[in-house]
Image (tube, rainbow, N blue to C red):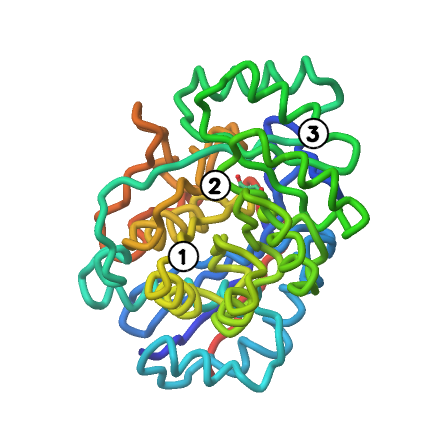
Amino acid sequence: MKIARITLRHVRMPFRHAFSTSRWTLTHKDAILVEAATDGGLTGWGECVALAYPDYCYESTAINALVLREYLVPLVLGRELADAQALWDAMSPVAGHRIAKAGLECAFWDLDAQACGQSLSTRLGGTRGRVETGVSVSVHDTPEALLRSVEGYLREGYGRVKLKIKPGKDLAETALVRKNWPGLKLQVDGNAAYTLEHLDRLAGLDDLGLLLIEQPLSNEDIIDHAQLQRRMRTAVCLDESILSADDARKALSIGACRVINIKPGRVGGVRESLRIHDLCRAQGVPVWMGGMFETGIGRALNVAVASLPGFTLPGDISASAKYFEEDIVEEPFALNADSTLTVPTAPGLGIRVDARRLARYTVAEETFRTR
Ligand code: OSB
Ligand code: MG
């Protein structure tokens, strides 16, 4: 496979509601979309999932664009790439920047699966036609507003709820949701806002019957998480701390977590996601699909990867309508009555990008060609 043309687009799409975590509030989704074309007439799409500001990690939308334009695109354009490993090797002169790499890698997989005439799910060995989903719920100003939000999502049909928490807005809020819905599949996400000084506070979550507690401590840490996991019955799940299969192996070997959140963007793409999936499956460790407010492009990727057998917990893959009035794909992802999304069956990612809507949200665009 040879990529002959790459177009990078910065899209900016308004959220239906502002979204807050322990660290930031967002009103828009920003992303770099990668459109890659072969001489043979195939077009593949990928999405770089970094946020507009580098606070979830050191990558951001602007940094993705810079790294792609200056370094990654020149490394891959016009080069013969046998498979995703060859693409990874071609990009290896650039250290880190896994989100930028994953955007390109997704477009490559879309092309590769189309060339095989298979859906990406089938190409990867997916075993289900529907994937179980849940919602990630913003930090709210008041407990009443939080309860109203959760109630709304349950009415829409979501069967699992993840509450964003931060120090001081955690125990009481989570206990309140638990009291209102005793049987609800419930979990929390601290987005690295806690330290070991909060050990007692975090251990207080143990009585609330949570599926897991996600990334309470620092991005850079696995040692303190291991200490926390020894203190808690609830499974600790790592998100920000796991950038590779090697990170996952080390974290599991010291007991820093009992569950792992896989985001293809965060770990450098599908190839690394498969490695983490396989490692965890071999050890009997559950994994689930994370989310980064994806457009229909990244959402299609997440749904395909989540169709693999090791994804045994519901993912943060909601319907497009949770975030957007209008998605950029022709058929937005919609929730089924059993709290699932349907895995696309058309070749590749199985989506069609709507050119008019794409143009509406594009704020910058640049094209690169082989000469
Ligand atoms: O920590 O899981 C997270 C969104 C952006 C960055 C980090 C996270 C999230 C979410 C939203 O929780 C998940 C979604 O896309 O619905
Ligand atoms: Mg998280």
Name the front one of labels 3 and 2.
Answer: 3
Foreground: 284 or 61?
284
Name the front one of labels 1 and 2.
Answer: 1
Q: List the residue tagged with mark 3.
A: 171
Foreground: 211 or 140?
211
Under mark 1, the amino acid is Val
Q: List the residue tagged with mark 1.
A: 285
**Label 3, label 1: how far apart the Cα atoms are:** 27 Å
Element under disc 2: loop
Q: Is mark 2 within 8 Å of ligand 1?
A: yes
Foreground: 207 or 173?
207
Q: Residue at x 30, y 23 (%)?
A: 337
Residue 341 image offset from top left, x and y in percent = 33, 36
Q: Quadrant of ligand 1?
A: top right
Q: Visible in this render: residue 62? A: no
> Residue lying furthest left in this view?
117
184 vs 299: above or below: above
Under mark 2, the amino acid is Asp
Task: Give the position of the N terminus as an image quadrant.
Answer: bottom left
**Label 1, label 2: how far apart the Cα atoms are:** 18 Å
Residue 172 image offset from top left, x and y in percent = 70, 24
Foreground: 258 or 165?
258
Mark 3 closeness class: few <14, some 14–19, many ≥20 residues within 10 Å? some
Q: List the residue tagged with mark 2.
A: 316
Q: Earlier in the sequence, mark 3 or mark 2?
A: 3
Q: Earlier in the sequence, mark 1 or mark 2?
A: 1
